Amino acid sequence: MAQLFKRNETITVPAFKNGVTLQFFNISFPSTVANKLTADNAGFVAGTYDAEQAKSPVARALEAIHARVSIEIIGAVQDNGNGAGRDVRIGVAAIGGNYPSDNYDGASGNETMAAYLQVLVRAASSTNSVSYQGVDLNSCTVTAFTI
C-alpha cells in the first residue's frame, strides 16, 4: 500500500497551527462573566436591559478584538488569578511570529498587542457608555501569556 510522507512538516511548541503562530492573551473582566456568555433576552423583555446592554460582555469583548485580529481559540471562563469566573483566554493568529510592539492605535508611541487589544475592549463600552449585563468593559484588562 502506498504511503505519503510529509518530510517538511514541523511541529513547533507551544503552539502550531499549519505554520501560523498562535499568540495567547488573557481577558480579565471586572466581575464574573461565567453566566453571561449569551444575550440576556429575559432581562431585555423584562426591561432590565435595553437591546445593547443585553448583549454578552464576553461576546462584545471578542467582537472588538476580532475586528483587528483573527481569533483562533477561545478558552473556557475560569480563574487565572483575577477572581472566579472573570478570565477568558484566547489565541490569535500571528503570521510570522508574535506581534511586536508597534503603533497599532495610530497615537503617539508604541504599544504591545495586549495593550492595543485592551484599548479595543475598553472602547466597546466607552463609545456608548454602555455596560453589558452589568459588566463595564472599561475596567477589563488584556495581558499576554505563554503556554
Image (spheres, rainbow, N blue to C red):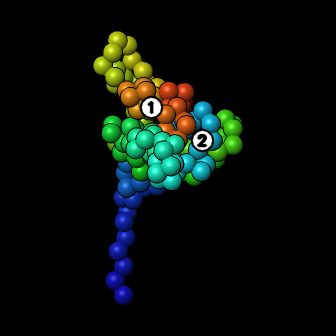
- The relative height of residue 58 versus residue 125 in the rendered view (above or below) is below
Q: Earlier in the sequence, mark 2 or mark 1?
A: 2
Q: How many marks?
A: 2
Check disc 2 and report its element: helix, strand or loop: strand
In front here: 96 or 115?
A: 115
**Label 2, label 1: how many angstroms apart (C-alpha)?**
20 Å
Q: Residue 45: image x %, image y %?
A: 46, 51
Q: Residue at x 45, y 45 (%)?
A: 55
Check disc 1 and report its element: helix, strand or loop: loop
Q: Residue at x 41, y 32 (%)?
A: 124
Q: Residue 61: image x %, image y %?
A: 45, 39
Q: Residue at x 34, y 83 (%)?
A: 2
Q: Residue 76: image x %, image y %?
A: 57, 52
Type of amino acid under label 1: Val
Residue sticking out furthest to the left:
106
Q: Residues within 10 Å of mark 1 (few under 14, many from 20)?
A: some
- The relative height of residue 66 versus residue 41 in the rendered view (above or below) is above
Type of amino acid under label 2: Asp
Task: Locate the N terminus and report the quarter of the image it occupies.
Answer: bottom left
Task: Locate the C terminus and report the quarter of the image it occupies.
Answer: top right
- The relative height of residue 56 versus residue 121 in the rendered view (above or below) is below
Q: Label for residue 130?
A: 1
